Image (cartoon, rainbow, N blue to C red):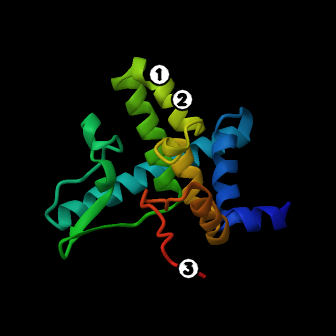
Amino acid sequence: QRAVEGFLLFSPRYNRAGLALIKDAFTGGMRGDLARTSLTKFAVWGMLSYTGISNLLGQDPKTDPRAVSAGGDGADFMTWEIGGQRWGIGSWWLAATRLLGGIAGDTAFNPDGFLSMSTVDKVLGTKGEYFMDGRAPRFIRSRLAPVTGGGLDMLLDSTYMGERLDRSISW
């Protein structure tokens, strides 16, 4: 199992630990209580730290993970502008927050569109050109090991960022 996870995932133990903590948060008993407490403390500390640093830098905090088209901060979520570029801490937790916050925002602001066939196609990848447009596939793709991700890029003929692969090079 470790060998398969190591081939498929980038930092498999880190990903497993994050998923285990989220899974435990949905269980009862002491384990669930501890997991929920840990997640709550992490979220509060992270948001307070980010907001404090934003204020120190004289910038408005970007705390809405929804897409810009839905009224959120999009890719600027929890980042700062430094030297004309956006910088952020980034982590498994931030990616999970973007995923869950984006899904919640999509559902709240467009409940009919969230379950439309085009959205299902995007999430499940039933139309190849839309595979990386869905939130879940993008989250999973961002967790893949470099070799596995590169293989998926070749299979889909595009990169994680949606750029077409250059096939003009002849070997």
Query: Where's residue 149, x and y in %?
Result: 61, 64
Disc 1 marks a residue whose amino acid type is Ser
Distance of label 3 from label 1 (alpha carbons): 41 Å
Q: Earlier in the sequence, mark 3 or mark 2?
A: 2
Using the rendered image of the protein, determine whether residue 40 is visible from the camera's viewpoint. Answer: no
Above or below 162: residue 112: above
Query: Where's residue 95, x and y in %?
Result: 48, 53
Disc 3 marks a residue whose amino acid type is Ser
- Residue farthest to the bottom? 171
- Left or right: residue 80 versus residue 65 is left
Query: Where's residue 8, x and y in %?
Result: 72, 62
Task: Tell me the residue at 18%/72% (across/down).
Answer: 84
Distance of label 2 from label 1 (alpha carbons): 6 Å
Asked if the residues shown at circle 3 and circle 1 are in contact, with their CB atoms under 8 angstroms apart, the answer is: no
Disc 2 marks a residue whose amino acid type is Val
Above or below 78: residue 13: below
Asked if the residues shown at circle 2 and circle 1 are in contact, with their CB atoms under 8 angstroms apart, the answer is: yes
Task: Tell me the residue at 40%/66% (across/down).
Answer: 89
Instruction: Read off the residue under disc 2.
Output: 120
Instruction: Read off the residue under disc 3.
Output: 170
Using the rendered image of the protein, determine whether residue 81 is visible from the camera's viewpoint. Answer: yes
Select label 3 or label 2 by which is in front: 3
- Left or right: residue 127 versus residue 66 is right
Q: Secondary structure at mark 2?
A: helix
Instruction: Read off the residue under disc 1.
Output: 116
Distance of label 3 from label 2 (alpha carbons): 37 Å
Q: Earlier in the sequence, mark 3 or mark 1?
A: 1
Disc 3 crowd, CA 10 A, few/some/many (<14, 14-19, 20+)? few
Q: Quadrant of the C terminus?
A: bottom right
Q: Which mark is drawn over residue 126?
A: none
Task: Tell me the residue at 47%/22% (across/down).
Answer: 116
